[in-house]
Image (spheres, grey):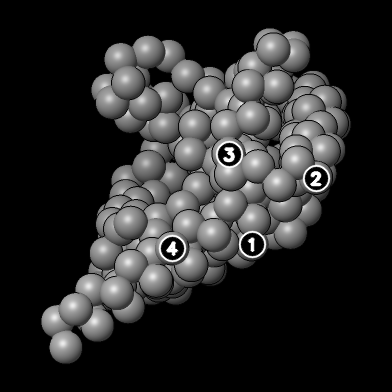
Amino acid sequence: MNDLVVYFHLFIIYSFMGWLMEVILTLFKQHKFVNRGFLIGPYCPIYGYGCLLIILLLKKYMDSPVTLFIMAIVICSILEYMTSLVMEKLFNARWWDYSDKKFNINGRICLETMLPFGILGLLIIYIINPFYMKILEKINPLILTILAIIILILFIVDNIVSFNVVKSLKTEIKIAEHDQTEEITKKIKEVLSHKSRLHKRLVDAFPHIKTRREFLKDIQNKIALKISKISKNI
């Protein structure tokens, strides 16, 4: 039970760190604060899950930094790919797209984001996780458990509320696609921006979101353009 509590706290810590990193990067690029991620609270669970997988599965590679680096890339890339796939199936939308990046796989993952996963794995195993474990070990187990219960309740409520907000996106996509418009995503963003602050936050958090239909059309256009260029060269 104590191990579960510790792992839950690590999950929340790394989820927060991931959220903080995303916010700082966005602040640097756009010069404004954007609450990143699917959830309302200051955490991005995909980072929490990724870090926990690294901690649980890659400790045995501590004596081989190269192997650890490669395995961290593999694990986190699979996680990112599957998250993108599942979210697209659930909500009929592509939340992020790396199609314009070199060495990408179906636009879901790319080399540019994969390499930092390896560096993150090394930092987690050798520096960051030992540091947090020392802190958690000094805290009374009862206090840790009470904190975990409180945070878990807030986390569950956040997931329920956020899921309902994201679910409304799927509804808007279905309505918009009946219009056969060329700018479905733009129309959906405009509709959501005029709803609650939670809906507007979703648009700000994922500015490059596209409906699946619009994404597939972009891919078809890119393929047609490449074929056209090849034909001209021939």
Q: Is residue 169 left or right of residue 118?
A: right
Q: Secondary structure at mark 1?
A: helix
**Residue at 72% from the left image edge and 52% from the top image edge:** 92
Mark 1–mark 3 Cα distance, whole angstroms, equals 23 Å
Residue where numbered disc 4 is placed = 221
Residues tagged 3 and 2 counted as in contact (Cβ below 8 A): no
In the depicted view, which residue is nearer to us: 192 or 228? 228
Amino acid type, mark 3: Glu
Secondary structure of residue under mark 2: loop
Decide: few, some or many residues near mark 3? Use Cα within 10 Å; few <14, some 14-19, many ≥20.
Answer: some
Mark 1 highlights which residue? 85
Q: Quadrant of residue 21?
A: top left
Residue drawn at point x = 48 percent, y = 67 percent: 220
Residue identified by numbered label 3? 183
As measured in the structure, the alpha-carbon distance from the residue carrying label 1 to the one carrying label 2 is 24 Å
Q: Disc 4 residue type? A: Asn
Q: Earlier in the sequence, mark 1 or mark 3?
A: 1
Q: Earlier in the sequence, mark 1 or mark 2?
A: 1
Q: CA distance from mark 1 to mark 4?
A: 22 Å
